[in-house]
Image: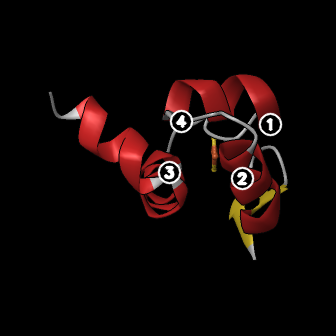
Amino acid sequence: MIICICNNVNSQTIETAVNSGAHSVDHVREATGAAGCCGKCQFKVNRIVQDHIPQEQQESACL
Ligand code: FES
């Protein structure tokens, strides 16, 4: 499914970026271009990031 219409980035591409270490919207933007134009997709991008960050990374981010 296309998440970022501006830059034609789909959810699989974002998931792959997160799994490769892009653990924030900024990092996903750098890796894929998603959320790099109008920004309307940033909440969807963030949702995918939060859903795919490894659990131990989420816990350490709260400390
Ligand atoms: S839809 Fe993603 S930057 Fe516009």
Q: Quadrant of residue 36?
A: top right
Task: Look at discs 1 and 3 and give the one toward the viewer.
Answer: 3
Secondary structure type for disc 3: loop
28 in relation to 5, above or below = above
Image coordinates for residue 30, horizontal then vertical, percent:
72, 22
Q: Identify the residue position indicated by label 1 in the image.
A: 32
Q: Identify the residue position indicated by label 3 in the image.
A: 53
Q: Which residue is rendered at x = 67% and y = 34% of the image?
A: 21
Secondary structure type for disc 4: loop
Residue type (three-letter) at the residue carrying disc 3:
Ile
Of the two numbered discs 4 and 1 on the same chain, state the one appearing first in sequence: 4
- Contact between marks 1 and 2 (CB within 8 A): the answer is yes
Q: Identify the residue position indicated by label 4 in the image.
A: 23
Task: Look at discs 2 and 3 and give the one toward the viewer.
Answer: 3
Marker disc for residue 14: 2
- Contact between marks 4 and 3 (CB within 8 A): the answer is yes
Image coordinates for residue 18, horizontal then vertical, percent:
65, 46
How many labels were placed on the picture?
4
